[in-house]
Image (cartoon, grey):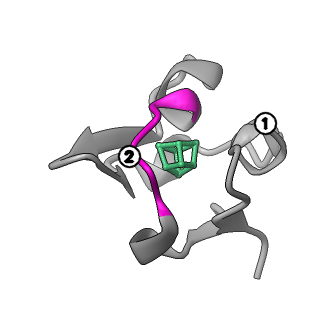
Amino acid sequence: MAPKIRGEECVGCGTCVSVYLQGVWELKEDKAYQAFPEKCSECGSCVENCPVQCIYWE
Ligand code: SF4
């Protein structure tokens, strides 16, 4: 299952969008959301690279 996000903490840097090339995350009004969670391979790259640690495993 794809990780969760505390959306109110997102600063819209776009790191999670660019770090995972399969395209799980997208930005909308400077907030990240999971556009394609079914593409998640559970690699953890977005969790590890989010600068404000707002993406997390449940
Ligand atoms: S890496 Fe974190 S702060 Fe940056 S857009 Fe993604 S969720 Fe938001």
Disc 2 marks which residue? 36
| Residue 16 placement: quadrant | top right
Residue 5 position within the rendered picture, expressed as x and y whole percent measured from the top left: 55, 69
- Magenta segment: does it hold 1? no
In terms of depth relative to the viewer, which is nearer, 11 or 55?
11
Residue 38 visible to an observer of this rendering: yes
Q: Is residue 19 left or right of residue 37?
A: right
The residue shown at (49%, 51%) is 38
Residue 7 position within the rendered picture, expressed as x and y whole percent measured from the top left: 42, 71
Q: Is residue 32 left or right of residue 24?
A: left
Q: Residue furthest left?
A: 29
Name the residue type under label 1: Ser
Disc 1 marks which residue? 45
- Magenta segment boundaries in residue numbering: 10-15
- Magenta segment: does it hold 12? yes
The kind of secondary structure element at disc 1 is helix
Viewer-side label of 2, 1: 1
Q: Is residue 4 above or below residue 24?
A: below
Q: Is residue 15 above or below residue 57?
A: above
The residue shown at (53%, 76%) is 6
Q: Is residue 42 above or below residue 58?
A: above
**Marked residue nearer the N-terminal end (2 or 1):** 2
Mark 2–mark 1 Cα distance, whole angstroms, equals 15 Å
For label 1, the crowd category at 10 Å Cα-Cα, with few meaning under 14, some 14 to 19 and many 20 or more, is few
The kind of secondary structure element at disc 2 is loop
Name the residue type under label 2: Phe
In terms of depth relative to the viewer, which is nearer, 51 or 5?
51
The residue shown at (68%, 55%) is 52
Residue 3 position within the rendered picture, expressed as x and y whole percent measured from the top left: 66, 64
